[in-house]
């Protein structure tokens, strides 16, 4: 997962232990570990805290988080993904 890979990379670069991020998010370390492995999605409200702790742009993390949600929704429907994405883009433009 894109979000998980990015937060793990940033955390390792900053040499922050998982337990420190877990504590800041008020979750246990195994739960944070699942987020970082992509086994459990982060909650949207956790992203600003993660971005702040990892000294990164919140918008980047939100974008990756949302991309993961889209990938999960598509699942193995790759055959229709591009067409569906085109419809989504049009719907977004139209508001």
Image (cartoon, grey):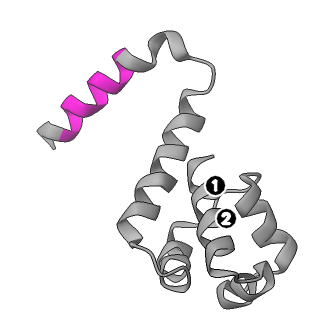
> Label 2 to label 1, Cα distance in Å?
5 Å
**Quick check: marks 2 and 1 in contact, CB under 8 Å?**
yes
Q: Position of residue 3 (x, y in %)?
A: 57, 56
Give x and y (percent) for residue 49: 53, 83
The residue sitting at 55% across, 79% down in the picture is 54
Check residue 8 in the rendering and tell me which mark sits there, or answer none. Answer: 2
Residue placed most toward the observer, 58 or 45: 58
At horizontal 76% and vertical 81% (from top left) the residue drawn is: 27
Check the image and name the residue furthest to the right: 30
Question: Is residue 45 shown above or below 95?
Answer: below
Q: Quadrant of residue 18?
A: bottom right
- How many dots with numbers? 2
Q: Position of residue 64 (x, y in %)?
A: 47, 53
The residue under label 1 is 5
Q: What secondary structure predominates along the stretch shown in magenta?
A: helix
Q: Which mark is residue 75?
A: none
Residue stretch rendered in magenta on the structure: 83-92
Residue at the outermost top position: 79
């Amino acid at each position: 997962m894109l979000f998980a890979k990015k937060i793990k990379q940033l955390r390792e670069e900053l040499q922050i232990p998982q337990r420190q991020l877990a504590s800041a998010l008020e979750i246990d370390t195994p739960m944070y570990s699942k987020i970082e492995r992509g086994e459990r999605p982060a909650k949207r409200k956790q992203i600003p805290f993660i971005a702040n702790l990892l000294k990164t742009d919140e918008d980047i993390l939100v974008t990756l988080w949302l991309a993961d949600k889209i990938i999960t929704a598509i699942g193995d429907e790759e055959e229709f993904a591009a067409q569906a994405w085109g419809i989504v883009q049009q719907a977004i433009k139209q508001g």
